[in-house]
Image: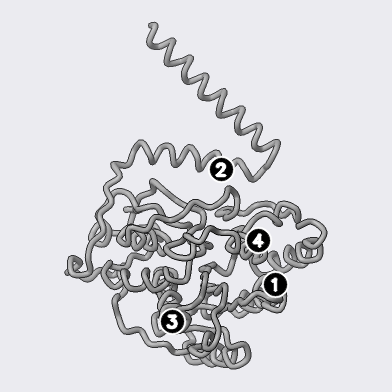
């Protein structure tokens, strides 16, 4: 009876604390309730996973798997911009992953945070990373080639542009920097549905310690998560590709930044590790093999969930997920109009 009463009291205490936290967070910041659930989720996974990290070598993966695209593989550049870095050393290279058919998102970014005319005195390059469209191939290829001729910001290789090939798209960006822009100080990989505060990012990078000029990668760090084994999930990873229970810590895929030398190091080590279809977890695997842990970023710099727009709040963020097309354009116009007074 005593044990039952103690358990009941403990349960009531937990429920009370959770209720109070939820009320406080919702009252102070409606979007913050998501952080509460993430905290409990990560606490649960911390207790439940056995933390086995097992990364295969390419030679170990002797049985081809449909979930693993061929890699290493001599993918060819169909559209390239090899001359963009010649003769200068950009401070920041923005690599935007976007679907090959999504012209609207590319134009929206060119006219909002990706408009390089907004950042006078800062050497920045912007590129869109695309694959080859599996449908309407010839027509869409003509559109991409015309876009490239007009803007000079398309990079494309000959793998299919699908969700499961996002890892290949990111590795293509790493390869491009390693081969054609090795003197870039920093590189950011970012998805097309993300708000990016370039000024805040540049300010942060400009004030890093000298040690962050190499072996540096940061973003919204994810720890104590493991592979999804349900075959119906789009995040399914088979045991044959990743037999471990837990992924190494990794930066959440919507946006992360790294020192320029990391592009070469990640690209090179990726030749040794079988590719999985979870792009950000794969980057964590590469970092683990390199023995270079990701750096924790300042709180709320990188936001994995959508945060309600507030101009003053957005002055102090680097990324906010789930802003694209008209939504991104409307937020950006208001933010850019107010930033001088507020930021």
**N-terminal label among 4 and 1:** 1
Q: Could you tell which of marks 4 and 2 lies nearer the N-terminus?
A: 2
The residue at which mark 2 appears reads as 35
The residue tagged 3 is: 134
Q: Is residue 169 positioned above or below 24 on the image?
A: below
Q: In whole angstroms, how far apart are the C-alphas of marks 4 and 2?
A: 23 Å
- The relative height of residue 153 versus residue 66 in the rendered view (above or below) is below
Q: Earlier in the sequence, mark 3 or mark 1?
A: 1
Density class for disc 3 (Cα within 10 Å; few <14, some 14-19, many ≥20) is few
Q: Position of residue 313 (x, y in %)?
A: 71, 52
Residue in view at x 39 percent, y 57 percent: 233
Sequence order check, earlier mark of 3 and 4? 3
- Report the mark closest to the observer, 3 or 1: 1
| SS of the residue under disc 3 | loop
134 or 223: nearer the viewer: 223
User: Does residue 236 show up?
Assistant: no
Is residue 195 or residue 211 the one in the foreground?
211
Which quadrant would the C terminus be assigned to in this image?
Answer: bottom right
CA separation in Å, label 4 and label 1: 15 Å
What residue did someone put label 4 on?
Answer: 200
**Mark 1 lies on residue:** 112
Could you say whether the residue bearing mark 4 is in a helix, strand or loop? helix
* Label located before the other in sequence (1 or 2): 2
Question: Along the line of sight, which residue is nearer the eye, 158 or 89?
Answer: 89
């Amino acid at each position: 009876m005593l044990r039952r009463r103690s358990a009941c009291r403990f349960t009531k205490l937990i429920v009370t604390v959770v209720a109070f936290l939820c009320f406080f967070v919702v009252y102070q910041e409606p979007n913050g309730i998501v952080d509460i659930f993430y905290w409990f989720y990560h606490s649960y996974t911390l207790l439940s996973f056995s933390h086995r990290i097992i990364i295969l070598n390419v030679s170990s993966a002797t049985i081809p798997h449909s979930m693993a695209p061929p890699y290493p593989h001599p993918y060819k550049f169909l559209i390239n911009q090899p001359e963009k870095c010649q003769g200068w050393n950009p401070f920041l290279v923005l690599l935007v992953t976007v679907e090959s058919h999504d012209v609207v998102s590319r134009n929206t970014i060119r006219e909002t945070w990706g408009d390089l005319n907004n950042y006078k005195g800062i050497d920045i390059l912007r590129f869109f990373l695309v694959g080859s469209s599996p449908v309407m191939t010839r027509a869409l290829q003509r559109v991409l080639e015309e876009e490239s001729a007009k803007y000079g910001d398309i990079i494309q290789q000959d793998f299919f542009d699908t969700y499961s090939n996002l890892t290949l798209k990111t590795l293509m960006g790493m390869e491009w920097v390693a081969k054609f822009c090795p003197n870039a100080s920093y590189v950011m990989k970012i998805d097309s549905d993300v708000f990016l505060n370039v000024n805040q990012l540049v300010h942060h990078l400009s004030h890093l310690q000298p040690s962050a000029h190499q072996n540096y990668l940061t973003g919204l760090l994810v720890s104590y998560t493991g592979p999804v084994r349900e075959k119906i999930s789009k995040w399914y990873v088979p045991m044959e590709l990743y037999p471990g229970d837990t992924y190494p810590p990794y930066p959440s895929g919507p946006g992360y930044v790294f020192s320029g030398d990391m592009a070469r190091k990640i690209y090179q080590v990726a030749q040794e590790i079988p590719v999985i279809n979870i792009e950000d977890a794969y980057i964590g695997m590469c970092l683990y093999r390199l023995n270079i842990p990701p750096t924790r970023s300042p709180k709320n710099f990188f936001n994995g969930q959508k945060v309600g727009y507030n101009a003053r709040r957005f002055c102090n963020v680097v990324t906010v997920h789930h802003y694209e097309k008209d939504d991104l354009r409307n937020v950006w116009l208001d933010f850019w109009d107010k930033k001088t007074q507020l930021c």
